[in-house]
Image (tube, grey):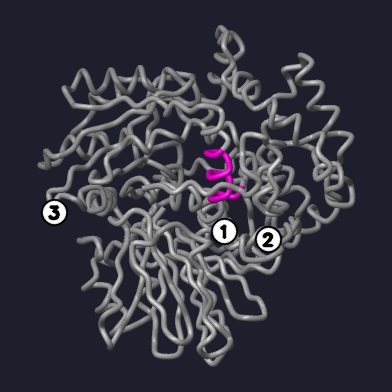
Amino acid sequence: MSWLFGFYSKQLNNVPSISKYHPEPVSSYHNSNCIIAVGGNENLLNYQTGNNQIKFFICGLGISANADSFLCVKEWDKLLLTSSENISKQNGHYCGVQINDDSISLFTDPMGLRVIHIAENNEGWFFSTRLDWILKTGAFEIDFPSFSSRWLLFNQVSTKSIVKKIINLNCGSKAYISNYKIGIKSNFWVPEKTKDITLDEFRHNLNKFILLGAKQNKHISLSLSGGLDSRVLLSLLINSDYKNWDCHLFKSESLMDNVIAAKILNDHNIPYRLFSPAAQNESDKLNYLFEYIGSTYISESAYTSQKLTHYSNLSQNDLIIDGAFGEMWRREFLTRLYLAGPKIVEGKNLTGISNAIKFNRADIFNQDTLNEMHAGINNQLNDIIDLLPPVKEIGFGNWLDLFSLKTRLVTYMAPEQARLDNFVTSYMPYIQFTLLNDLLNMPLSLRKNHRLFNKLFYPQSVDLTKYKLVKGNVPYPFYFNPVMKRVYSIAYSKFAPKEKNNGLDLFLEGMKEFIMDSVSSSEVRSYSPYNYENIANNINSYYNGHSSKSDYVNWFLTFEIFRQILQKTSISPILSKEIPTVIMS
């Protein structure tokens, strides 16, 4: 990713070297108070260190508030010089540091798509966009009350760090370090109901973000799948006057995704590229797992990470767009909670809410740890309910979407966006600050059951509605509403032929030596939060032929790698004793 790493000292002229914590930087700066380095994808770095009036480093892709340009050094300079409040009102995803004579200020984008992690010790404050690099600076432990929802629910509800003694700066929040003290200015933005947004206005606003690269004649490449959200983007690209674009597909186990997407593109003579996952030997695979889990901190499983190696094949000069989080505009998040009804939230039925959004990963923790985690979930849910507008004020459907916006976007989407910033210049048109400010101004009745997106196809792209959509590996007619799709998917999956080669089983077979060495190690046996007997029984059962335990083993592997990064140990004989850092170009 485009990365940032720095240190601010509590003592004048006592700034240590930080080079051992990060790869070779693209640029760096130091004075008597601090030292800062940035690196990674140079297309996503903006910095100015020679100007006596203002010095700064910024990582990520900034987009102007009026959605007409990407922010460059001159525009950042003007923003920082005129009004620091405007920094948290821009589109895109970014974070940065502004340097004054004897102080620094850290800032983040309003959506929470880039995060700065801050850790304090006796000498000063370390700060970085990489949590795993911060973990190298001292001794740290998992914060199980914060981590709880990340493991037991769909995604983490709190935006706090899952590691004790580390501050997560995100969602437009700022940190000020001066006079050897730190101050945090929190920010909690939510859309407000101010005006009515029509279909044509939404189309116009979305188009502005899709075609941002056109003014610079950048080559736009759309990540196309068999789903609805990316097809809407395809429709708008087809009907634009811009010609410098194509599509790309990622080969995956969900073959119908590729089949239907390729058919659409071939029928419309649209150029595209099909990418397969990068080939890896066993050592590369382990290094990649440590790098992936260290940089995304258990937002996805170890096995899922293997499906996300495609982006290294894309050109850094392309402008990549995709349909991520389009569900926000078709009211399709948190269906089980929606079916439970608004009273479950209005009455703060925390157990009921937890049950409606729970996610079964792996039962690897002992009862005392689980008790601590369940209490943590209750506190997190209670806090977010207090922060969001009341259900009676905005409606239950809107409340659920705001809940997803303020939790899932920050804790699930943000780590992957930061990781992608290492490889490509990419952004998600549906998740932009000015666009989402209109979320509550779009009638809920228009967003439900895909009505908004379906209407965008008429009359310009009605032919695209003739192709089936895909969810998972299940193709279904375009006109199906969410209920019809769900019923059809259950029936289809029940009678569809099963794949002979199970990708997860093949992956876990390749990881067997590492997993078995880990389970038999003294570090795992003595890790007090673990339910060691349960872990050993399930893993032995899986490798003795009980394939139903595969998900359990996959999620244990995921957490165990993060635990090793946290405790700076490595079980694998393939890896060196120090956790590897893979330096991406």
Q: Mark 2 vs mark 3: which is more N-terminal?
A: 2
Determine whether 509 is above or below 567 in the image: above
Residue at the (67%, 80%) spot, across then down: 122
Q: Mark 1 vs mark 3: which is more N-terminal?
A: 1
Determine whether 241 is above or below 7 in the image: above
The circle drawn on residue 216 is 3
115 to the left or right of 320: right
Q: Quadrant of residue 269?
A: top left
Q: Position of residue 374 (x, y in %)?
A: 80, 53
Q: Mark 1 vs mark 2: which is more N-terminal?
A: 1
Q: Position of residue 477 (x, y in %)?
A: 40, 20
State yes or no: discs 1 and 2 in contact (Cβ < 8 Å): yes
Residue under pointer 2? 163
Determine whether 152 is above or below 51 in the image: above
**Residue 577 vs residue 307, the one in the foreground:** 577
Residue at the (33%, 49%) spot, across then down: 429
Q: Is residue 210 magenta?
A: no
State yes or no: discs 2 and 3 in contact (Cβ < 8 Å): no
Amino acid, disc 1: Leu
Residue under pointer 1? 131
